[in-house]
Image (cartoon, grey):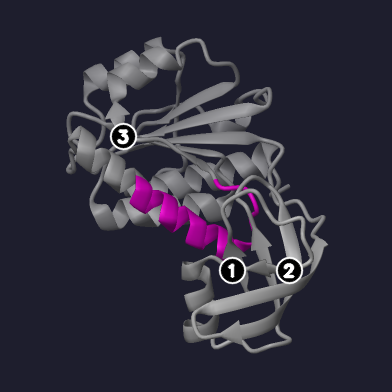
Amino acid sequence: MSAPRFYCPPPLPLATNFELPPEAAHHASRVLRLRVGDAVQIFDGLGNALDATINAINGKHVLLGNLQTFMGQQESGLHIALAQAMCTSEKMDWVVQKATELGAAEIIPVQTLRSVARLSSPRAEKRAEHWRNVAVSACEQCGRNTLPQLQTPQELGTWLEDVRHTAGGKFILLPGGAINLQSQPRPQGRATLLIGPEGGFTADEANIAQQAGFIPILLGPRVLRTETAALAGIAALQTLWGDFN
């Protein structure tokens, strides 16, 4: 059984002893009920991790010792950016969690005409912080030491203009797409995947995306829910060109 993992904001300690942050300490002592001598692992979200042992537990404080650099690497050679149209809160949480587990390097929530959820600027920033916490928990569970870049929600048109000249493969999942992903050349280091909302993209949105260089693809003969499409798309990219092969 692998050691419990805890996110610790950078920088990771260089000393021989280290006290877990309050939230991680509470989870370790009160939820997981770890004891002195138990092995744990801490990571900073930037790709660095340390193996450690619990030296002491005193109330709300958990002190670690025997810190050793962990040399494992869980990042894909393919940088996958997922642009997910805003959907219901529960579905967005699911997409962020599973996209993190599948190895997405970036997650960009975009507002579309048919997006069920639309957030004002203050609420958008608060929601982005919530999604970051979801990603942290997913990294703790799946063994990733690098957090995906989570952006605040932005309008689809604005984002498309920003990525118009971005290098790498750009793909949009459309019911009318006639291009198989496996027929495309291997992206040079980066693949951007654009997924629509529950009601799909409007014709204008699909056209604008294609004008920005997005290739309309289809993943099988069935219509996928937005949250299913995102995860199927990432898995397909990882299988063809990432670390699933």
Disc 1 element = loop
Image: 29 above or below 127: below
Q: Position of residue 179 (x, y in %)?
A: 49, 26
Q: Main secondary structure of the magenta part?
A: helix
Q: Earlier in the sequence, mark 1 or mark 3?
A: 1
**In whole angstroms, how far apart are the C-alphas of marks 1 and 2?**
10 Å
User: Which residue type carries mark 1?
Assistant: Leu
Q: Is residue 139 magenta?
A: yes
Callout 1 touching callout 3 (CB < 8 Å): no
User: Which residue type carries mark 3?
Assistant: Pro
Callout 1 touching callout 2 (CB < 8 Å): no
Q: Which residue is mark 2?
A: 17
Q: Earlier in the sequence, mark 3 or mark 2?
A: 2
Residue 144: give its label: none
Instruction: Residue at 63%, 43% (x, y): give it.
Output: 238
**Which segment is the magenta one?**
129-147
Disc 3 element = loop
Residue 153: give its label: 3
Query: Would you call the spot at circle 2 few (<14 residues within 10 Å), some (14-19), or many (20 or more)?
Result: some
